Image: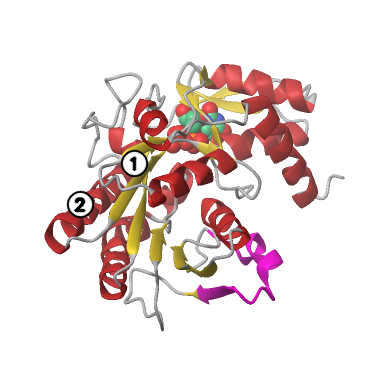
Amino acid sequence: MRILVTGGAGFIGSHLCDRLLSEGHTVIAMDNLITGSTDNIAHLAGNRRFLFVEHDVTNYIYVEGHVDAVLHFASPASPVDYLNYPIQTLKVGALGTHKALGLAKAKNARFLLASTSEVYGDPLIHPQPEEYWGNVNPVGPRGVYDEAKRFAEAMTMAYHRYHGLETRIVRIFNTYGPRMRINDGRVVPNFIFQALHGQPLTIYGQGEQTRSFCYVSDLVEGALRLLNSDENDPTNIGNPTEMTILEFATLVNEITGNAGGIVFKPLPEDDPKQRKPDISKARALLDWEPTVALREGLVATIADYRRRLKLD
Ligand code: UDP
């Protein structure tokens, strides 16, 4: 197949490109590089089945020739990034999704939207099943991302219902792994960077809030199984192993042997108190579940950070 990956130079996007190329597909990666980086795809230079196009997908997307699938993964995805780029975040979720859907329709291609657990906001139901409509503050600092992705889901369903487009929606829960931008501000890069420099890990609030971390190869596997299924409604892909941020910090300090300890910082506004995917649907429909344990995934991620930080 010939596949367009928007956000193809990003963290998840670049892993998707690798996986698709390894399966023999031809991949066009598109990215405006505001949070993505060509470092993530530098190893693909010279691959004749790979093409990188620097383009902001909030503008008209032109692709020559046939396209079999459009995987729309372009967006800032870290709370720090979407606070720095609030309007770009809203635009890529809204206008970018519209352009990507328009291209899929013109090419009669299958469409996959990268959505997010943020559509559930600060959830009042735990764990979160797909049927839950969420608890989102539209005008809070995270609203730019949450509402953009909620709009993107609505737009995707409209193209499916009105135009009969073959669409898929994956709701991605906290994903981590090699290539996550070191300064993207999320908890995994922050803690690993701090631990590798002997610094205290910055815990926001009391660290009682929970997250459930999924290794990137598990996420990619789940997303592609969904793409190849015939399910149009949103599907959660994430790892249901839940822990508090304090427990997570303790684990990072233990694995890295960091003696820097922890330090408490103010909790950002609207920070979700708990998050854990209900993956019953993905299990039943896609026969999918995560296979990489957190410790194993962290060891691989830390090794990648050591390389990039030139600590080896
Ligand atoms: N967090 C933290 N220290 C950091 C960065 C994040 O305690 O240095 C917390 C953050 O407040 C949140 C959780 O870790 O409760 C996960 O944050 P992240 O930015 O990774 O993404 P989120 O899941 O909130 O979208």
Nearer to the camera, 97 or 187:
97
Residue position marked by numbered label 2 in the rendering: 157
Q: Amino acid at mark 2?
A: Met
Q: Name the residue rendered at 41%, 29% in the picture.
A: 283
Q: Position of residue 192 (x, y in %)?
A: 68, 35
Query: Which colour style is shown?
Result: secondary structure
Q: Is residue 92 visible?
A: no
Q: CA distance from mark 2 to mark 1?
A: 23 Å
Q: Name the residue rendered at 16%, 63% in the picture.
A: 163
Q: Name the residue rendered at 52%, 44% in the picture.
A: 221
Q: Amino acid at mark 1?
A: Arg
Q: Name the residue rendered at 41%, 37% in the picture.
A: 286
Q: Position of residue 103 (x, y in %)?
A: 31, 72
Element marked by disc 2: helix
Residue position marked by numbered label 1 in the rendering: 142
Which region of the structure is painted magenta? 36-53
> In terms of image quadrants, where is residue 198?
top right
Nearer to the camera, 89 or 72:
72
Q: Is residue 162 left or right of residue 147?
A: left
Q: Is residue 134 magenta?
A: no
Q: Height in image: 236 above or below 1?
A: above
Q: Height in image: 216 above or below 239?
A: below
Looking at the image, the residue that sits furthest to the bottom is: 64
> In terms of image quadrants, where is residue 134?
top left
- Mark 2 beta carbon near ligand 1 (under 8 Å): no
Q: Position of residue 267 (x, y in %)?
A: 44, 27
